[in-house]
Image (cartoon, grey):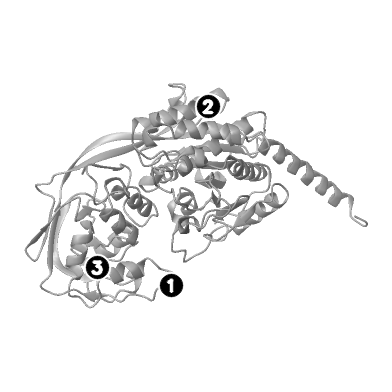
Amino acid sequence: MQGMSCKALLAMALAGLAGAAAAQVAGRVSGAEARNYVYVLSSQPMQGRDTPSRGLDASALFVASKLDEWGLDPVGANPAGDPLRRFFLPIALETIVPDLQHTTARMSGHAFVYGRDFAASGRFAGSAEGQLVFVGSSLADNVIDVRDKIMVLPPGTGMAAAQSYAAAHGAAGIVLLPGMGQIVSMLDPDAAGEMMADNSDGGMDPALAAAGLRAPRLAMTRLEAADRNPGDVPAIVAGPVLLNALFHGEKTGATKLVARAALPGEASPIAGFALAPEKVLRFSLAATATPSETEDVIGLLPGSDPALRDEYVVISAHLDHLGHGFPGADDDGSGSAGVLAIAHAFAQGAHPRRSMLFVWHAGEEKGLWGSEYLTRFPPVPLRQIVAELNLDMIGRSKPAGDTDPRDAHLALPGEVFVIGPNLGSQSLGAVLDRVNSGYLRLSLNHYWDRTGDPDRIYYRSDQYNYARAGVPVVFFTDGLHRDYHRPTDTPEKLDYTQLEKIARTAAALAENLANGPRLPQH
């Protein structure tokens, strides 16, 4: 310490006091409290918290009742109205019921069945007819003429980019190939949740996550506010039968295309080619739409500094899951309970300089609906959000001696996967490292915090929409395990000590961000 200036000593003392304050707030986060919330949210009356559903609405009312009890402020559309619904940000949805008489697809004399062999993607209207061309791995590198043709696109192609390219180059229609996980779920009636998982990575239209290609009911619900340009090129997603028919006899088979597309960081590029000229696909899409609604839940803790209270730190989880038969204790009952416990800890007398928003999103399992809606119609200016911390699956840890390959990427006790700093905000990552090293010293695993991740985990939870809007993000997760998107994701399997440690670390980081210098935006 010899030779240090008074200014440096004062700075160190203030840093120590700030660290102690952060630990004091985070120390109030209780795993036992979170456990009770997990059991409520994953209970049978909550019906699996599908979007939309009475179970999700009941879960939202439960969260809102706690926010009201703790004295947090509402940020909903009607803060002077119903004492609980004033915490809601209403999200307009619509339920689409296909007109099966006018929703058809035919090729080479064979008729395909909607809901099994194909589904709509994007605007559920219009028709297309033409020969087929497979566009290679990258639209930007495509050299195949698509004018008046139907473009066949590899798995994971973003529909916005596909629509823009198709319209600019005069394509008649679009067929999107499904990913490997989607094909498995189409063929396996016990894998109802898997297709939803694949579709939440931003590469597929959210409507498909609700419908599936093998769903017993054909009605689907989608985000009403999603962009649907009346001039969009008609688009469908192929199921296994149509997929095989498209590539039967071609130089590259359907299985090879789908399998290679599942490894975007490792597979060599796939060149485009025209399919056999006698293959002419004709499809038409028609449906009726009925409006419905769901909601995000938001609570506000106002900042104490008049100069900074109009800046915000956001802590989020997704409240929804897959519906009946899927308790969703870890996904994302654990994250939702963790954010509740953090909100309660801050409500007990914490006075950070910046304001804090605690958010529970709807529709994450359907394609990140709630976070898309919030970032498109934000209750506070996005440029004033300093950082966003997302908790999605934070309640499981790998037991000693576990050799199940499905648990290969499940966090060990005292470990957490962090995603976002290396992909967008290294400055936020540096703050996290500093806070963590001075507090609980969790092992921070950056396995998915990289480009070329074949699991695309970064794109499959709500922080992605904030990052797209330029907000620095950190996504905390325990990883993937044998009960992911299964009816066996039940509350007694959670490690509540693990949940507490991760939630406390997130709370300490949030406290630091709420009081420290503003981070550079993306």
First of labels 2, 3 by sequence position: 2
Residue 383 appearing in the image: yes
At label 2, counting other C-alpha atoms closer than 10 Å, the crowd grade (few under 14, some 14-19, many 20 or more) is some
Measuring 33% from the left and 75% from the top, which residue is drawn there?
Answer: 270
Task: Give the amino acid type for the residue marked by disc 3 in the picture.
Answer: His
SS class of the residue under badge 3?
Answer: loop
> Label 3: which residue?
169
> Label 2: which residue?
66
User: Where in the figure is residue 2, as x and y percent of width and height?
Assistant: 93, 56
Closer to the camera, 407 or 33?
A: 407
Task: Give the amino acid type for the residue marked by disc 1 in the picture.
Answer: Glu
- Looking at the rendered image, the disc whose residue lies closer to the viewer, 2 or 1, is 1
Q: Residue furthest front?
A: 401
* In this picture, residue 372 sits left or right of residue 37: left
Q: Which mark is residue 396?
A: none
- Looking at the rendered image, the disc whose residue lies closer to the viewer, 2 or 3, is 2
* In this picture, residue 474 sits left or right of residue 221: right
Task: Give the amino acid type for the residue marked by disc 2 in the picture.
Answer: Lys
First of labels 2, 1 by sequence position: 2
> For the residues marked 2 and 3, what is the alpha-carbon distance in whole angstroms?
53 Å
Q: Residue furthest right?
A: 2
